[in-house]
Amino acid sequence: MTENVTQYLNENRERLLNKLKAFLEIPSVSTNSSNAKDVKEAAQFVESYLEEIGFTTVERIDTDGHPIVYGEWLEAEGAPTVLLYGHYDVQPADPLELWESDPFKPEVRNGRLFARGASDDKGQVFMHLAVFEAFMKTEGRLPVNVKVCIEGEEEVGSAHLYDVLDQHQDKFKADFCVISDSGMVASGQPTLLYGLKGFTGLEVTVYGPNRDLHSGLYGGAVKNPAMALSHLLASMKNEDEQVTVAGFYEDVEQLTDDERKLMNEAPGEAYETTVGVTETTPEKGFTAKEHTMARPTLEINGLFGGYQGEGTKTIIPSSATAKLTCRLVPGQDPEKIQDLLVKHLEDHTPKGTTLTITREPLSAKAYKVDPTHPLLQEAAKSYSDAFGKDAVFVRMGGSIPVVETIDQMYGIPVVLLGFGTPEDNLHSPNESFPLESYDKGNETLVRYWNAVATL
Amino acid sequence: MTENVTQYLNENRERLLNKLKAFLEIPSVSTNSSNAKDVKEAAQFVESYLEEIGFTTVERIDTDGHPIVYGEWLEAEGAPTVLLYGHYDVQPADPLELWESDPFKPEVRNGRLFARGASDDKGQVFMHLAVFEAFMKTEGRLPVNVKVCIEGEEEVGSAHLYDVLDQHQDKFKADFCVISDSGMVASGQPTLLYGLKGFTGLEVTVYGPNRDLHSGLYGGAVKNPAMALSHLLASMKNEDEQVTVAGFYEDVEQLTDDERKLMNEAPGEAYETTVGVTETTPEKGFTAKEHTMARPTLEINGLFGGYQGEGTKTIIPSSATAKLTCRLVPGQDPEKIQDLLVKHLEDHTPKGTTLTITREPLSAKAYKVDPTHPLLQEAAKSYSDAFGKDAVFVRMGGSIPVVETIDQMYGIPVVLLGFGTPEDNLHSPNESFPLESYDKGNETLVRYWNAVATL
């Protein structure tokens, strides 16, 4: 039964890839208010495609932010119902000068499709829709009942998704959830994610004098907010990469020796090649694999204050700002961690300065599912068969807050069936997605829907 | 003999102020290459004015950077020769949104002339030229022989001045030097500066991965350059405002109890009113007056790395940069201090990162002159008489590298006769200069030239 579906995908490959390119051309950067119209256009693209495919209900759920697209096709009597989640918004493309081709003019080079969102997550959302199209055009039906939820605020913390899910619990209810918004541990290595990190963050600004001051006239009298910020930040993590915020590790679920062994045996990334660092710097007492997969992190995402232009400007800046986010592990409560960070900053406020702290409005708990669950085992089989290589089960340092929400809300398994690769440059210049992942990923999905139809 | 000169200045006040405004309208920002044409225009303004006044020689000395304007009038037989130094370039005006009026559309409000350069230093250079004009138009001559040297690179470390002075030692040779590029300790309080700080600096960039990375996928494996920079900066100064770079204080000339007493008795600035800080933070063991006047400083002038836009971008930035400058005191050698800073940074380079250090190309030693010298005493008298208040002698945290150069090169006294006030917002938005300083400062200069003619 899957051959004609696969054949349809092959015969229509060029047309479908062009359709994907049209989707990627829309600069749906959710964090920039100037892109609001583009974000809406991307939502419209998803809606139109669902209607074309033959989804029986297609709705745009408006929010105070960007809309959520809902679609359903529920005519597979006796088969389970899947909730497919994805997002049509993307990260900002800056710094633009580092892109080899326009981030919003998709281009294939060396077997990869380059564009912002090619991997995260428009490319992977599109694969699902293309596979649904193939089933409908060949079989006239889908193997399972499908509810689709594609949001436009994932890259800004899914600001309105949770309220919408909560208000429409019946609409989104399903037997399991599938999300393709992640990747393989190595290109061509089928990978099932059974754990994700949680997330929280904040922005802190240190204020000193009411304007930039002459460093000669005021240096020695007035605290320098940039130096004060450096002291504050340095007080939060030591040079052994241990977070020194009181209570930060208190609730961390300890790793078992077995799990550490599994993690260290998983195929690793050659960081020197992929990101150009000659040395990894994990938390003292842990390997880089252990830290990225299963230990919490605190990162400075951005830092600014004072003069940034050409040459020298001898000022004491009036303020300095840092953007901070944490990735959390099972056991840690994001609200509690955010409170601890705020308390640490307040307790360490340098003399002669005041702080403004803006809490990241949304946060998420970490997530872990039993890797032996039949829905995960079946996913591993389809994935392995399509790629011709045994799947591995891993945990990941990334956060998909919706996973935790769906887990809490419905208590259903979430299958993380991602096709990205470590070379995709997520959130970076020159994001891309391998066409091999596109083709074999589609094949994985065709096999998986057929397989779970009778589970 | 001074009455008719003063009368000329009064009768021509409006015309002269309009001429000054035309000078201030030229955005001669020397650090921005895009303003190169404007900087040249400001040089042209000075040249034309010197010719109008009747200087017998007016030359533009071209350099690889911005030109130096030289003028001379040497017909006061038997009188001493003064070298007048000033600069026609200005600091950048950003952040523009904090200016209440356009920085390059001069405007008088509440008795102050608002414009970039109104105080530092175009306004004060103009006063000298206006006073020379007044002498020439009324007396037909100047009381002293005058050599004028007005440069266009003071705000970028006087990159070419020193070579020019060195190559033209005879041309610039004089009996003493006068510079009006400083201010009073309080508005209306005649102030003679007898000491200035030296200067050095550098820019350091911490490099980590070869691009911005996803903080979830790489956090825990890759060193965060923004955090590494925070550790580096925090390692350079402790929370007691003591610079912790090895050897930094080694050659510092210690303050005597008498000098500390004098400094602490000088009128102070009410920082809460002038710059909005409720607490001063001087080096442990010193007062704010002692630290600003006579202890070395290390300041972060600018700080940047990673995402600075709206919202959150969960990245590990690929690099982070800080701009640092020091103000030095007598005894300290700027090159040695720069070497110590570089060594400290290199010795403390965080694991998993590399550094690029750009040394500030020009630096200066601190300067001190004997306050009992007749040329300084005479300046104090003219200043006190014009302002109706006894002058005070102070040292200042600012640097005027040319002072040290002239001192070294010619061994002549440098009289720092500045008319700015603490409310002038030097190097900040809303720079201004009080018209009271303009009027009484002109009167001071008229009296001073007459007085020193017979010294």
Image (cartoon, coloured by chain):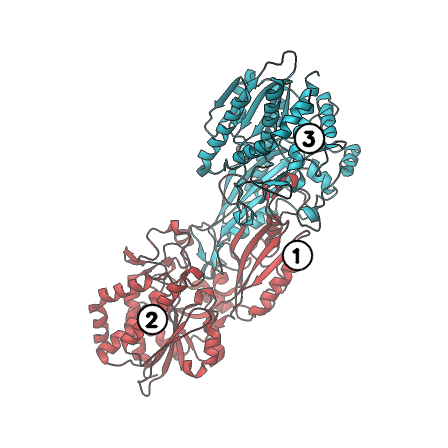
Chain colours: A red, B cyan
Query: Which of B40/B356 is in front?
Result: B40
Residue lying at the far top of the rendered structure: B78
SS label for mark 3 = strand
Placement of the N terminus of chain B among the 4 image quadrants: top right
Q: Which mark is residue A46?
A: 2
Q: What amino acid type is highlighted by mark number 3?
A: Gly
Residue under label 1: A348
Q: What amino acid type is highlighted by mark number 1?
A: His
Image depth: mark 2 or mark 1 in front: 2
Q: What amino acid type is highlighted by mark number 2?
A: Val
| Other-residue count near label 2 (Cα within 10 Å), few / some / many at <14 / 14–19 / ≥20 | many
Placement of the C terminus of chain B among the 4 image quadrants: top right
Residue lying at the far front of the rendered structure: B11
Residue under label 3: B195
Query: Which of A66/B253 is in front?
Result: A66
Can the viewer see residue A252?
no
